[in-house]
Amino acid sequence: MKIANKVQFFGLLLGAVMLLSPAYSQIVTFKTLDKVTAKISSLESEVGLPTVLGPLTITVRTCKTTPPEEPPETSVYLEIDESRENKTERLFSGWMFASSPGLNGLEHPVYDLWPESCKILADDVLIGKE
């Protein structure tokens, strides 16, 4: 193996270990719209943990943000379930994009939701860019 390949492999391995470490977490920031009150709010959700918005349960599976030298884009793969009358129904499962909120949007009579940014936190200290 060439030295450059070994260095790249070590860098990828170190990055994977850092992201899998329990001290690190990835936080996704969403903008939400309550269509009844016309109120826009921010909502933060940790990757892998469910977050509740009214009757909706949002579970982010992964979040990707382009590096600063590329055109800005945040992509989020998530699942959204709605609980009604002791039943849970999957409303959305797929990718949402910050640059195109209408492309793959949530269709709900009360709430709109779109991703804004991804952040990486290490021991409650922001180490990733929005």
Image (cartoon, grey):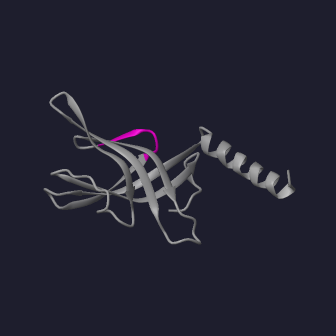
Viewer-proximal residue among 63 and 50: 63
Give percent across and percent down for residue 128. 57, 58
* Residue 50 magenta: yes
The region drawn magenta spans 46-52
Viewer-proximal residue among 40 and 80: 80
- Name the residue rendered at 29%, 58% in the picture: 41
Viewer-proximal residue among 113 and 124: 113
Give percent across and percent down for residue 110. 17, 51
Give percent across and percent down for residue 45. 41, 47
**Residue furthest to the front:** 1
**Residue furthest to the top:** 86
Q: In the rendered view, does 66 fall on the left or right side of 101?
A: right
- Name the residue rendered at 59%, 56% in the picture: 127
Residue 22 quadrant: top right
- Name the residue rendered at 61%, 45% in the picture: 19
Whether residue 42 is situated above or below residue 26 in the rendered picture: below
Q: In the rendered view, does 116 fall on the left or right side of 130?
A: left
Q: In the rendered view, does 120 fall on the left or right side of 51?
A: right
